[in-house]
Image (tube, rainbow, N blue to C red):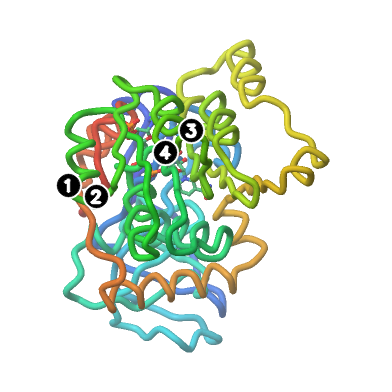
Amino acid sequence: MPKGYYLIQNGPADSAFDLRELPSREINSSEVRIAVEGFGLNFADVMARLGQYRECPPLPTIIGYEAVGTVTEVGAAVRHVKVGERVLAFTRFGGYAEEVITDHRGVVPIPDTWSLGWATALATQYATAWYSATYITQLHPGEKVLIQAAAGGVGTALVQIARHKSCIIYGTAGSAAKIDYLRQLGVQHPINYRTTNFYDYIQQDLQGGRLDVVFDPIGGKVSRQGFKLLSSGGRMVCYGAASLTGKNNLFAKLRFALQFGFFHPIQLMMRSKSIIGVNMLKVGDYRPEALQTVMQEVVEASKSGLLQEQKTTEYPADQLATAHTALEKRQTMGKVAMKW
Ligand SMILES: NC(=O)c1ccc[n+]([C@@H]2O[C@H](COP(=O)([O-])OP(=O)(O)OC[C@H]3O[C@@H](n4cnc5c(N)ncnc54)[C@H](OP(=O)(O)O)[C@@H]3O)[C@@H](O)[C@H]2O)c1
């Protein structure tokens, strides 16, 4: 029987997961069964483990948004993938497993030559970046773009897309090694926020000018400052709340919420600024065709070379706790993937 890593309790990674047999079940007509070679980690998984992710199903549960493997069975209505094909699958949880069953609209065939890390990065991190940068904000050449947590998985993907669109990029990260990595990626203004105040740096650099687009997965005060730097016609995408990590008590949560500041539609209208929330789970739930299009476009953009393989750290699956802890402690760059 195939097995999977169940999240059995919230807290430190060492005691959070347990490898258990998966229940067997039939697939329905629109589903695909996949024998998994490996799966990816996302920061949302850390939030889920810490009990800070609202969407996480009740425990025990298997989390994980993406898996790469070989199709072993397809439902009667599935046309675009065949048994025996290597595929990338967006899973609405259930990814940390040797076998995955998921809706066919989240499944895309991929070349055998693609590394596990590269392929897993595409389902969630590149799809999020692609959806945010092309559909939501429609980056234009020459626009000045701030990418927070730019050395991470989504951040790297956003940098590649913004580079392709000839944008001027301000990218923040929290260590000297990450700043080197951002330089290699072609970020014109890598900012180590531990040594340089990003708000002051950008204000000074723009000499009274403003940003066109802000990508913000941090939240709180960082979002408020990003919004202040935004010009008229500017767009800010909020897609995460990393600064909430580990803040479990009510007071800390309230403080986090207040730190965003207050926005009013009249204020947005008068200044012609946009704030847009992105949650790919909801896109998958309510616009599965949109998710399918985004995943197909991301795979095509990778084949054409528009998107390039990003830095990956690959761990054996039995080192799940180590990998989770590294992601939580901000020690990772690019994608983290687990191999069975
Ligand atoms: N809304 C969506 O649909 C969606 C989809 C995918 C991802 N996301 C969000 O996008 C963000 C990036 O996801 P990812 O999987 O690619 O992760 P990641 O960026 O590879 O890892 C998270 C990074 O966030 C930075 N960070 C800033 N404050 C942090 C804090 N308090 N605790 C921990 N890390 C902090 C760290 O980079 P530095 O060391 O440079 O600070 C860390 O390496 C996450 O916030 C995630 O929840 C949202």
Measured Cα–Cα span from mark 3 to mark 1: 29 Å
4 or 1: tag closer to the N-terminus: 4
Query: Where does label 3 land, which residue?
Result: 218
Residue 316 — which label?
A: 1
**Going from the N terminus, do you reach mark 4 or mark 2 first?**
4
The image quadrant of residue 87 is bottom left
Distance between the Cα atoms at labels 4 and 1? Answer: 29 Å
Label whose residue precedes the other's in the sequence (1 or 2): 1
Determine if residue 1 is in view.
no
Between tags 2 and 3, which lies in front?
3
Residue 17's disc number:
none
Between the residue at mark 3 and the residue at mark 4, the CA separation in whole angstroms equals 7 Å
Mark 4 or 1, which is nearer the eye? 4
Q: Nearer the viewer, residue 293 or 129?
A: 129
**Does residue 35 appear anywhere in the picture?**
yes
Query: Does residue 101 appear to the left or right of 55 in the view shown?
Result: left
Q: CA distance from mark 4 to mark 2?
A: 25 Å
